[in-house]
Image (tube, rainbow, N blue to C red):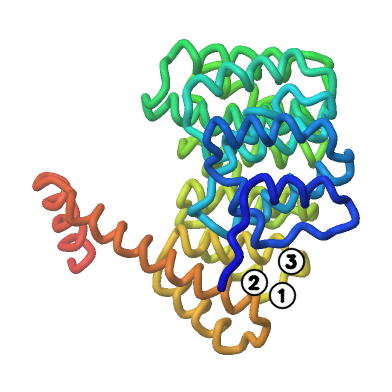
């Protein structure tokens, strides 16, 4: 007979710092109703600080592996916690939220929180809401306020790491002044700023940046190479494909760059990328890399199908132009 566990039992267990937090308990914290949420808030102040952080990190790990759980109620409840690290982790629990009102809350945290960690997390998540704004899924006013706050931070003397993340978040924005901010960062000598500029370029989905991205694929600094290969995939830069294949065949030493190049090849598509990834999969014995390559090949299938659809969606005049080019080549 299976023992029934109440949420109060789960909370009692949380209070006992000598016990591990069983994985089976984590789902009980998902989608809390108002009464359960109140129970959680009543108990929270009695939980030891290290135990709080342990629970939140376990919830985040569970959230990454199970798309059926949601910890938004807990995330929202802890946005005003006294501990800055708790506030930061609470924001991460809200990563899947598309509630427009959250954009205003995150903007306020960015501008007014007294600690760096929650401001960093708020900045990263604001990028997703700017993207929602570009897709017209949140009000323009909310998007504008978020953009204004991020621009203010970039132009300030604030923490450099925060300013870089703010630039990356603004990559999603189509506002004209963002172009100059990206250009300015790209022209710096600091590799970290150049990498952030490249990430912003990738998020823009604007082919004006293609040449800049390609120029950095073989840079000596692995931070720049990694950002460049990611941006090349996001921008679907076809000419970047052969360069990344060359990087991989010459045994790129940085693991992040290797993983980024593999995924970007799956985003760009093409038969050369498929042949390379299939061969690499056949030679790989590492389980994690095998799974990663299988996911990349699945994404490559999607990309190639999408590319075929794009070709079929050409209007008659465009198809005639393609035919004329083919005839000229035959001549």
Whether residue 168 is visible here, answered yes or no, is: no
Residue nearest the viewer, comparing 302 with 46? 46
Q: Return the residue at label 3.
A: 255
Whether residue 301 is visible here, answered yes or no, is: yes
Q: Return the residue at label 2.
A: 248
Residue at 64% x, 71% y: name it. Answer: 248
Q: Is residue 256 left or right of residue 204?
A: right
Q: Quadrant of the N terminus?
A: bottom right
- Label 2 CA crowd tier, 10 Å (few <14, some 14–19, many 20+): some
Residue at 85% x, 46% y: name it. Answer: 51
- Label 1 CA crowd tier, 10 Å (few <14, some 14–19, many 20+): few
Task: Give the Cα distance between marks 1 and 3.
Answer: 10 Å
Q: Are marks 1 and 3 in contact (CB under 8 Å)?
A: no
Q: Return the residue at label 1.
A: 251
Residue at 67% x, 45% y: name it. Answer: 8
Residue at 19% x, 55% y: name it. Answer: 322
């Amino acid at each position: 007979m299976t023992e029934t566990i109440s949420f109060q039992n789960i909370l009692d267990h949380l209070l006992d710092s000598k016990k591990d937090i069983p994985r089976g308990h984590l789902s009980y914290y998902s989608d809390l109703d108002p009464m359960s949420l109140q129970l959680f808030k009543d108990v929270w102040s009695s939980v030891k600080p290290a135990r709080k952080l342990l629970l939140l990190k376990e919830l985040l790990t569970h959230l990454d592996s199970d798309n059926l759980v949601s910890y938004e109620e807990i995330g929202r409840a802890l946005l005003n916690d006294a501990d800055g690290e708790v506030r930061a982790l609470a924001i991460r629990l809200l990563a899947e939220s598309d509630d427009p009102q959250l954009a205003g809350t995150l903007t306020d945290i960015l501008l007014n929180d007294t600690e760096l960690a929650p401001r960093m997390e708020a900045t990263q998540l604001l990028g997703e809401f700017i993207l929602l704004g570009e897709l017209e899924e949140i009000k323009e006013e909310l998007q504008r306020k978020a953009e204004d706050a991020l621009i203010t931070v970039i132009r300030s003397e604030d923490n450099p790491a925060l300013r870089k993340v703010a630039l990356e978040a603004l990559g999603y924005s189509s506002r004209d002044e963002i172009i100059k901010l990206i250009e300015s960062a790209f022209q710096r000598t600091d590799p970290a700023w150049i990498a952030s500029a490249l990430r912003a370029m990738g998020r823009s989905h604007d082919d004006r940046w293609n040449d800049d991205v390609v120029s950095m694929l073989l840079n000596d600094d692995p931070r720049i190479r990694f950002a460049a290969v990611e941006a090349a995939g996001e921008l679907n830069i076809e000419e970047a494909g052969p360069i990344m294949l060359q990087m991989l065949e010459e045994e790129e030493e940085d693991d992040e760059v290797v993983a980024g190049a593999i995924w970007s090849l799956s985003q760009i598509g093409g038969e050369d990328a498929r042949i390379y990834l299939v061969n690499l999969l056949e030679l790989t014995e590492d389980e994690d890399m095998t799974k990663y390559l299988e996911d990349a090949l699945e994404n490559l299938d999607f990309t190639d199908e999408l590319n075929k659809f794009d070709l079929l969606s050409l209007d008659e005049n465009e198809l005639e132009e393609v035919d004329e080019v083919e005839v000229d080549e035959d001549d």
